[in-house]
Amino acid sequence: MKYSIIIPVYNSARYLDTCVQSVIDQSSDSEFEIILVDDGSTDGSGSLCDDLAKKNKSIRVIHQPNQGVSSARNAGIVAAQGQYLLFLDADDLLHKDLLMHLDAATEAQPDLIQFGFCKFYKDGRCTDHSPPATKHGETGQQYLQRLLAQAQHPLQSAWFSAYRSAFLRKQELFFPVDIGFGEDFMFRMGCLTVAQHITDLSLTLYRYRIHEESVTRTLSFDNIRDHLTVYIRLFRKYPSSVLADYYCVGILLLARLSPSDAKELTPLLDENRDLLKMCKGKKARITRILLQIFGWYNGAKLIQLLSRLKKKIKM
């Protein structure tokens, strides 16, 4: 079997039909399977998964108690039979020619194949995005080092790439289950570190749906804590001013929390204060100075206030 498309499903009944149909409608003649991992849904998504599997023999269903998207994707990796794996969120869509374009790209057996994606909105707007291009013969480590040296880092989501299944299993690459936000980025960085052959397609082949849940899920205490934790872990493994800059600016998310919630993050921030010394970007350096003067929470609130005043003056 050529491809396994892994779709984690949690309370996704509203979008699941169209998501799955976008895979079924692929123009490629290559054999594929769709693995629906029902992660303890409570809205009938689990039953819908079973109904879809009854209608199409290419669909397999895994039911598990709610453990989060990382656990669901990991279950899909273990169960997958395809030579290449793709991750598809249950509210998103694949371009009908994605697998057809991958057919040619997989002939050289790369470990990882990247492609572009578009963010599409309810009002019909669509904005295209592409990962930084690879160079011929470049390993994942060389690609990563080049991007960091150019003050960039790779795009974070797991779903705009196809992964060679034998590569993932040999390197024991799975999603971290103790992180609920930013887990994609850690998985991607782990893959790039050991990939010997990466390539990309200069085509927009994934459709990422923007809706209310896409925005609000970034605002919780847990997600802000995980966001900071991910950059700390990555910096410790791949020391870079780029990652330090993102971490420093990420501290400004404290302004969205209550004083008591922000205080809970103080030990984490104090323990990793040394990352601020690595900041080189202008915004990060200004942020660092204000945080050092006014403290974590008050500094973040002050910068938030200054940002709002700046926008009003421009208006």
Image (cartoon, helix red, strand yellow):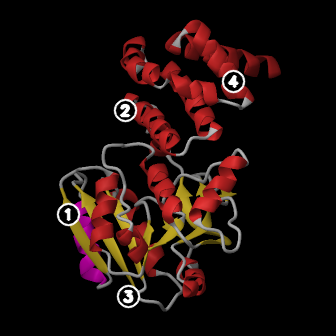
Q: Given this view, does label 1 or label 2 mark the residue nearer the observer?
A: 2
Per the model, the C-alpha gap separating discs 3 and 4 is 51 Å
Residue in the foreground of this view, choosing between 152 and 130: 152
List the residue tagged with mark 4: 285
Marks 1/3 in contact by CB < 8 Å: the verdict is no
Nearer the observer: mark 3 or 4; the answer is: 4
Q: Quadrant of the C terminus?
A: top right
Q: Where does label 3 land, which residue?
A: 1
Amino acid identity at mark 2: Asp
Which of the pair 131/48 is nearer the observer? 131
Residue 6: x %, y % from top left: 37, 68
Q: Which residues are magenta?
A: 45-56
Q: Name the amino acid, label 3.
A: Met
Mark 3 surroundings within 10 Å by alpha-carbon count, few (fewer than 14), some (14 through 19), many (20 or more): few
Q: At 36% across and 59% down in the image, what residue appears?
A: 174
Q: Main secondary structure of the magenta part?
A: helix
- Few, some or many residues within 10 Å of mark 1 (<14, 14–19, 20+): some
Local secondary structure at mark 2:
helix
Q: Circles 4 and 1: CB distance less than 8 Å? A: no
